[in-house]
Image (cartoon, grey):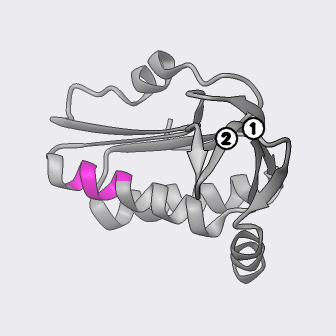
Amino acid sequence: MNTFQVAGQTIDVTAFRKELCDPGCGAYVQFEGWVRDHNEGQQVLRLEYEVYAPLAIKEGQRIIEEAMTRFGLSHAAAIHRSGVLNLTDIAVIVGAASAHRAAAFEGCRYIIDQVKTRLPIWKKEHYASGAAEWVNCQRCAEAAHSHA
């Protein structure tokens, strides 16, 4: 698999894991980012992600390749959702497989940290109060421009 993808539909966790399964690997680490019901003191009802897919996929693939090289991973992949997500939906999934656990843990952490700071993905939170707000937009926009 070794890819970064953007998905407009629910992520199939079982299929994702199966793509990374390898009998030569003794470790597999998976991270799932879920939509939670609160942020900064506000009750969140749902999220909305907008993604500039061409750049997100290109830069996301670069992140996967960096992690593979840097940590000696056998396999790595990530999928980020776009569109409207409800509470507990998976917003992002990352998987890393390697011969040993340290590399898998470190590689998975590296991928999610880089995805969150480098990709042109914007999140809008919808609150119980009726308000809605784009969060971390400036940071995301700056990261997209610096890596284009």
Q: Secondary structure at mark 2?
A: strand
In the rendered structure, which segment of residues is drawn in magenta? Answer: 103-108
Q: Which residue is mark 2?
A: 44
> Quick check: 143 above or below 42?
below
Q: Callout 1, which amino acid?
A: Ala
Q: Quadrant of the C terminus?
A: bottom right
Q: Residues within 10 Å of mark 1 (few under 14, many from 20)?
A: some
Where does residue 51 sit, x and y in percent of width and height? 80, 51
Checking the image for residue 103, the label placed there is none
Q: Residue at x 33, y 26 (%)?
A: 21
Position of residue 14 in the picture relative to residue 109 (left or right): right
Q: Residue at x 52, y 65 (%)?
A: 114
Q: Residue at x 31, y 51 (%)?
A: 73
* Quarter residue 31 falls in: top left
Where does residue 101 sit, x and y in percent of width and height? 16, 46
C-beta proximity under 8 Å, tags 2 and 1? yes
Q: Which residue is mark 1?
A: 128
Position of residue 2 in the picture relative to residue 99 (left or right): right
Q: Residue at x 47, y 62 (%)?
A: 113
Relative to the observer, which residue lies in front, 77 or 85?
85
Q: CA distance from mark 2 to mark 1?
A: 6 Å
Relative to the observer, which residue lies in front, 135 or 98?
135
Q: Callout 2, which amino acid?
A: Val
Tag in front: 2 or 1: 1
Where does residue 15 sit, x and y in percent of width and height? 49, 18
